[in-house]
Image (cartoon, coloured by chain):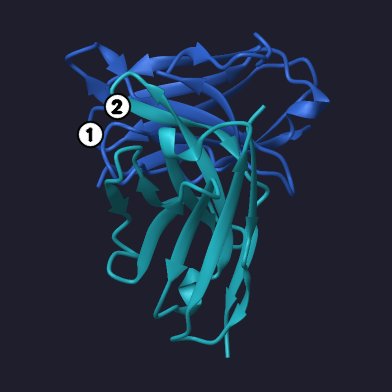
Chain colours: A blue, B cyan
């Protein structure tokens, strides 16, 4: 199984500041035949189900604000919130869909400083 | 718009069984990948199972041989039959739609979840 490791476990950021979350996979999730990274990011607010933010490592889902961006390739990925808003308080999780089981990272809790 | 509603959760004793349901609306479940994902209290997300549009099924190692995913196309409903339940199966179980994405899929719609508690 591919192990997904996120860091940090939690972070506190001031409103309007940048938040950066890292995700590392135990093996590459880059599929050579289409040159796409099968890595997605989800946001989960308290008491709610996860919401898809980004797929293919860097493609924003429709309706997701452009302050959210994803980057990285192979085994190392980053989710960046360029200017943290109060409504961004949530747990963010990465997930690989390169091979079953489609494993998730442990999650990173983002709070307001 | 797609909508998913889970039901069937509750309190069950270790070794017992439970069947979860996920009613889909706004799309045809049998034409999509449909998955179950669970989240233990205070923990991260764990992928449990998937049924492909063609009917193939796959399971996570922790539930293989105990859980079974299926669907009723006439009811547009997904199921998860859970047998030989253990305390570590305690979690909120989410039903999620997998949207085809290249050679794989992403979970673009989720239900609100149903809580399963395994305890004596």
The crowding category of the residue bearing disc 2, from other C-alpha atoms within 10 Å (few below 14, some 14 to 19, many at least 20), is some
As measured in the structure, the alpha-carbon distance from the residue carrying label 2 to the one carrying label 1 is 6 Å
Spot occupied by residue B113 in the image (x, y as percentages of width and height): 64, 53
Q: Toward the viewer: A68 or B109? A: B109
Q: Which residue is mark 1?
A: A27
Q: Measured along the vertical axis of the image, is residue A85 above or below residue B89?
A: above
Residue at 79% in and 21% down: A85
Marker disc for residue B58: none
Q: Which residue is mark 2?
A: A75
Mark 2 touches mark 1? (CB < 8 Å): yes
Q: Chain of mark 2?
A: A
Residue at 78% in and 15% down: A16
Q: Do marks 2 and 1 share a chain?
A: yes
Q: Measured along the vertical axis of the image, is residue B65 above or below residue B87?
A: above
Q: Is residue B7 left or right of residue B61?
A: right
Spot occupied by residue A6 in the image (x, y as percentages of width and height): 45, 38
């Amino acid at each position: 199984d591919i192990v997904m490791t996120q860091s940090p476990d939690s972070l506190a950021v001031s409103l309007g500041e940048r938040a950066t979350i890292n995700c590392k996979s135990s093996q590459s999730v880059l599929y050579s035949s289409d040159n796409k990274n099968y890595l997605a990011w989800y946001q989960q607010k308290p008491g709610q189900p996860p919401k898809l933010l980004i797929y293919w490592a860097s493609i924003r889902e429709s309706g997701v604000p452009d302050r959210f961006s994803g980057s990285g390739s192979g085994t190392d990925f980053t989710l960046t919130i360029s200017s943290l808003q109060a409504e961004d308080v949530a747990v963010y999780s990465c997930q690989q869909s390169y091979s079953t089981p489609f494993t998730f990272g442990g999650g990173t809790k983002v709070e307001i400083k | 718009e797609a909508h998913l509603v889970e039901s069937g959760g509750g309190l069950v004793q270790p070794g017992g069984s439970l069947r979860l349901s996920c009613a889909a609306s706004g799309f045809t479940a049998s034409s999509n990948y449909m998955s179950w994902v669970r989240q233990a209290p205070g923990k991260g997300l764990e992928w449990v199972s998937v049924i492909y549009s063609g009917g193939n099924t796959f399971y996570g190692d922790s539930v293989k041989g105990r859980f079974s995913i299926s669907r009723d196309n006439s009811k547009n409903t997904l199921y998860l039959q859970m047998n030989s339940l253990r305390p570590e199966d305690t979690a909120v179980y989410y039903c999620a739609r997998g949207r085809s994405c290249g050679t794989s899929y992403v979970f673009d719609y989720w239900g609100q979840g149903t809580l399963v508690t395994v305890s004596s």
